[in-house]
């Protein structure tokens, strides 16, 4: 099953093996014809209107802000509704450095996102600590705090790379099971239990 988006050729994507394995895992048990059709319809709408949470802690945030300007125009993809409240957002793009004092705040924001929720780790700092790697005050990757769906390297990544990362997230949403897809929520709950944050109650 070729999972693509926005008329971009299938061969141009870099993570095709991962997406194909995700498709096989999610569709392994089969699906009812009606439920499968509803899944496709709902996921088509969700994947073309994913709203980001306005959240940035350093230089990656400036690159993300430029997506809303005329040159990159994220409105053509349906992402322009950047929300200030986590309860109205679909995904959080962790754009910048996360220090240990910020970790409980990030976890709280993640907990407040409505289901289904997604995370993009944007930039070297969010992916692995970046130039502050092995530092005493910076978290060595946000995947120590919250489950990450898409990793976006760069210091800072260009706006084109951010568009590509959100398109990858869009592809991932397209192949999910909307009805009965509790396995994703169970994995999230297991992750959060295994990664406790002081000061944040589960």
Image (cartoon, grey):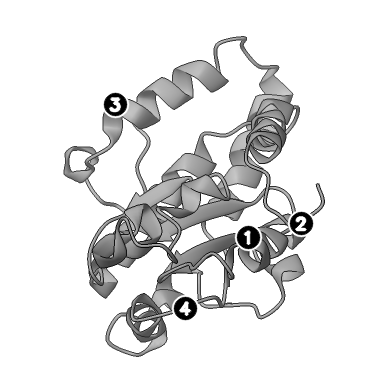
Question: Badge 2: how crowded within 10 Å, few (<14), some, or many (20+)?
Answer: few
Ranked by sequence position, the earlier of labels 4 and 1 is: 4
Q: CA distance from mark 1 to mark 3?
A: 25 Å
* Separation of residues labelled 4 and 1 (CA atoms): 19 Å
- Give the alpha-carbon distance from disc 2 to disc 3, as whole Å: 36 Å
Tag in front: 1 or 2: 2
**What number is the disc on residue 57?**
4
Corner quadrant of residue 122:
bottom left
Q: Position of residue 50 (x, y in %)?
A: 56, 61
At a point 34% along the width and 59% down the height, the residue shown is: 129
Q: Earlier in the sequence, mark 4 or mark 3?
A: 3
Q: Distance between the Cα atoms at labels 1 and 2?
A: 21 Å
Q: Is residue 21 above or below residue 168?
A: above
Residue 99: x and y, percent? 49, 68
Circles 2 and 4, Cβ within 8 Å, touching? The answer is no
Residue at disc 2, secondary structure: loop
Q: Which residue was labeled with disc 3?
A: 17
126, above or below 192, in the image: below
Mark number for residue 90?
1
Which circle's residue, 1 or 2, is located before the other in the chain? 1
Q: Of discs 4 and 1, which sits in the foreground? A: 4
**Residue at the extreme top:** 29
Q: Residue furthest left?
A: 11
Residue linked to disc 2: 200
Which one is in front, 121 or 133? 133
Q: Is residue 142 above or below residue 26?
A: below
Q: Is residue 148 left or right of residue 191?
A: left
């Amino acid at each position: 099953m070729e999972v693509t988006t926005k008329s971009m050729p299938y061969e141009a994507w870099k993570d095709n093996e991962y997406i194909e394995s995700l498709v096989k895992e999610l569709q392994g048990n089969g699906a009812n014809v009606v439920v499968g059709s509803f899944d496709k319809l709902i996921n088509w709408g969700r994947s073309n209107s994913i709203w980001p949470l306005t959240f940035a802690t350093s230089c990656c945030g400036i690159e993300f802000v430029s997506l809303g300007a005329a040159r990159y125009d994220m409105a053509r993809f349906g992402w322009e509704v950047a929300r200030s409240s986590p309860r109205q957002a679909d995904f959080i793009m962790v754009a910048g450095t996360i220090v240990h004092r910020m970790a409980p705040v990030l976890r709280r924001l993640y907990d407040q996102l409505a289901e289904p929720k997604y995370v993009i780790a944007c930039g070297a700092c969010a992916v692995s600590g970046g130039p502050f790697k092995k530092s005493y005050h910076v978290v060595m990757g946000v995947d120590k705090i919250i489950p990450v769906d898409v990793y976006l390297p760069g210091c800072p990544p260009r706006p084109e790379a951010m568009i590509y990362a959100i398109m990858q997230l869009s592809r991932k949403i397209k192949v999910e099971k909307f009805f009965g897809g509790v396995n994703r929520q169970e994995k999230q709950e297991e992750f959060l239990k295994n990664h406790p944050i002081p000061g944040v109650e589960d």
